[in-house]
Image (cartoon, grey):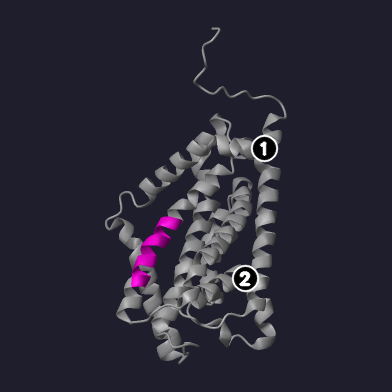
């Protein structure tokens, strides 16, 4: 009707439009991102006895075990003045975020089969929203870190202000690898069994229970191909003031960027076939 404004936005689907307007559509469907994120948060610990307390119990138990094994048994020491328990927990904090985010993102498409086969929206929203639950776990675990810092009477250095940058680096690493794996998981369902093994194996080859300084100098740049090496070293540098090898950090950042580009490229390449293969 003339002079009357239409309040509701109309979505028009036409051939080739999704490719041209893909990134704009991500913004247009931002409410779906919020809805999926909130849904994942609500069902994360649904029907569990202790609920979100798992975000506290898991890192604390792992920290205790690693402290006993590497500090008490293997006699490894912290490279700085911080207690070894803090060294381990500061490594466990970003690793737990990365492993949870990777696991959630890699299974996100399979877990939303009905949504993918019924309606159009940028599929990138699904793995992106699944990572939000891992941020909540990280926030809870970070609260435990604050309590531990008070208990050990350890004051973080000024560079703790750079901590959000290393958290962002961990998020990008998980997002890049998660995009690639979740796209593979749609076609090859074996990956749902491979990912837990990779995460468990990665816990022991990543400097969570020990400092990366124990790695021989000639192998450190090769070791930094693991993107979480730079992230964990960065966390410890920010919180504990331990030394940070800039070269290893640069390698980890470069590898993270490569994984992010590869994940986005492969996800967009295979996105059209998700509804058929899932």
**Mark 1 and mark 2 residues within 8 Å of each other at the beta carbon:** no
| Sooner in the amino-acid sequence: mark 1 or mark 2 | 2
Q: Which residue is mark 1?
A: 272
Is disc 2 placed on a helix, strand or loop? loop
Residue 226 is tagged as 2
Give x and y (percent) for residue 142.
39, 66
- The outermost residue toward the bottom is 75
For image coordinates 51% across by 82% down, the residue present is: 242
Characterize the magenta stretch by its predominant secondary structure: helix
Residue 92 in sight from this viewpoint: yes
Give x and y (percent) for residue 241.
49, 81
Left of 148 or right of it: where is 96? right
Nearer to the camera, 83 or 223: 83
Q: Provide the residue span drawn in magenta.
A: 135-146
For image coordinates 67% across by 72% down, the residue present is: 250
Q: Give the distance between the C-alpha atoms of the residues marked 1 and 2, in whole angstroms.
A: 31 Å
Tell me if residue 107 is in the magenta stretch. Answer: no
């Amino acid at each position: 009707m003339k002079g009357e404004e239409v309040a509701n936005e109309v979505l028009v689907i036409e051939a080739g439009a999704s490719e041209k307007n893909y990134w704009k559509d991500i913004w247009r469907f931002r409410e779906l991102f919020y809805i999926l994120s909130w849904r994942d948060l609500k069902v994360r610990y649904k029907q569990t006895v202790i609920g979100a307390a798992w975000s506290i119990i898991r890192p604390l138990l792992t920290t205790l075990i690693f402290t006993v094994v590497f500090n008490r048994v293997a006699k490894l020491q912290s490279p700085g003045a911080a207690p070894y328990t803090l060294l381990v927990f500061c490594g466990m904090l970003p690793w737990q975020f990365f492993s949870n985010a990777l696991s959630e993102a890699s299974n996100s498409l399979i877990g939303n089969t009905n949504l993918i086969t019924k309606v159009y929206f940028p599929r990138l929203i699904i793995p992106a929203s699944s990572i939000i639950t891992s941020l909540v776990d990280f926030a809870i675990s970070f609260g435990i870190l604050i309590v531990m810092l008070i208990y050990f009477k350890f004051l973080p250095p000024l560079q703790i202000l750079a901590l959000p940058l290393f958290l962002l680096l961990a998020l990008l690493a998980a997002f890049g690898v998660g995009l690639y794996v979740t796209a593979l998981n749609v076609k090859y369902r074996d990956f749902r069994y491979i990912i837990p093994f990779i995460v468990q194996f990665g816990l022991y080859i990543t400097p969570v229970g020990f400092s990366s300084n124990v790695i021989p100098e000639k192998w450190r740049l090769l070791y930094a191909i693991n993107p979480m090496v730079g992230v964990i070293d960065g966390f410890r540098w920010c919180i504990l003031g331990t030394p940070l090898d800039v070269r290893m950090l640069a390698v980890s950042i470069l590898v993270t960027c490569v994984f992010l580009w590869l994940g986005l490229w492969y996800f967009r390449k295979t996105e059209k076939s998700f509804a058929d293969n899932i």
